[in-house]
Amino acid sequence: MVRLDKKVTRLYVLDTNVLIHDPAALYHFEEHDVVIPMTVLEELDKHKNGIREIAQTARQISRTLSDLTSRFTPEQIQEGIPLPVSNGPSGRLRFLCYTDLKTLDPLVDSPDNRLLAETCRLRDERPDASVILVTKDINLRVKAAALNVPVEDYLNDRAFDDLDAMIEGAKVYAEAGVEGRGLWDRLNVEVDVERTEDGTFYHLAGELPKDWHVGMLVSDSDNGAGFEAIVRSLAPSRATLQLLTNYRHHDGVWGVHAHDSRQNFTLNLLMDPEIDLVTIAGNAGTGKTYMTLAAAFQQTLDSKHFERIVFTRAPIPMGEDIGFLPGTEEEKMSPWMGAFHDNMDNLLRDEQHGSSSWSDGATRQLIGSRVQIRSPSFMRGRTLSDTFLIIDEAQNFTPKQLKALITRAGRNTKLVLLGNVGQIDTPYLTANTCGMAYAVERFRDWPHAGHVTLKSVERSRLALAAEELL
């Protein structure tokens, strides 16, 4: 990384991939100026034709630039266009156009090399400012560093810090009660208990932890906890906690019981009618799909709270694509639904006889009448009402794609996102920029959303050894 001079003025030169990655990138550089070279405008013009997502994004960026420039004269555009911001000082949008530009020796003439030449020339013309090239192209960043050009990756869209890719959604005071220190002694708050028909509520007053947020779990132990509650409301010096239902023993969900605090919290979120969006993260084998399907069948087949279950996931292959698949929409999605079929086999297994009724035709027909397996590609324009919507492998969706799916929710619809940010198969997505992380961060303080990261793993010795050794 090239050392950046600490100067008052900064000029951020944006690459084409930054604008396509985030069309709103123009507004994310605070009081600093944003520079768009003519090379970038030419590349946007090449990408604008077609119906692919990249073409739609390129047209969106062109419309944004057109709206910004339409209100100013050519002389004002040359001086820089003020960028509208909601608060604080604003920077300016500048365009870079050189009629006598020459590529750097010995580099060949290409869009990346022309962009480097434009950045180097702007750096030489503006010694009073720090000129920084912003690009998501790793090779271009390496070449820029070799040419002593300050360069950065575009990180503004990262939902979390690198050191914390996914919040846990839980605060477990595992050592509470040790040496006479109870949970309430550690919290140092005044507690008022209220019992109503809706449950038991704990009203807290005092200095509350800064890492608390609405919809998180507060527990005094990972296993066999004596106190488990969800944060219902939160203010600077006040909070309301509601005691959770214990699903460990008799009160199971469709025959499924919790094994620790996080699993019990998960089942409470899935069964809570006040929670409309549930995000569940965790490694393979933590029971994400298993518990979600159990809660879905409990509320669809037994309590009749929902009319149907819609199960979808991103059809992204882990390796080589298997190509065209014949049949209907559900038949095309069948190869991607292995997790659904495996968990249904476990949910309907008769432990006494060691067999599963999932292979029975009548059972499949009964459940199949309430369960729809749908492709996310055909969700645009739909409104799903009275539906328990499950989106599996949510980490393989971009934030834009996941937003399109979440907005499909209609009246009396509960939406569950399942994923593991450590298993992303979509190119150009990371644990920080995927749709799963984006949704968790944006809904973090919404009172009708809940998130939990599962930790307990019930897996074979071989699977556990593979995690450690490979």
Image (cartoon, grey):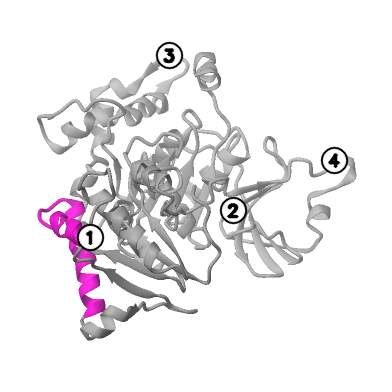
Which residue is the site of mark 1?
Answer: 101
Q: Are marks 4 and 3 in contact (CB under 8 Å)?
A: no
Under mark 4, the amino acid is Val
Q: Mark yes or no: residue 385 visible.
A: no
Mark 4 vs mark 3: which is more N-terminal? Answer: 4
Dot 4 or dot 2: first in sequence order is 4
Question: Of callouts 1 and 4, which one flags the residue occurring earlier in the amino acid sequence?
Answer: 1
Determine the residue located farthest toward the right in the rendered image.
179
- 162 or 369, nearer to the observer: 162
Magenta highlight: main SS? helix
Residue placed under numbered mark 4 in the picture: 178
Q: Nearer the viewer, mark 4 or mark 3?
A: 4
Q: Which residue is denoted by mark 3 in the rendering?
A: 354
Separation of marks 3 and 1 at Cα, in angstroms: 75 Å
Measure the C-alpha gap from mark 4 to mark 2. Answer: 23 Å
Q: Please give the label number shown on residue 216.
A: 2
- Amino acid under label 2? Met
Q: Nearer the viewer, mark 2 or mark 3?
A: 2
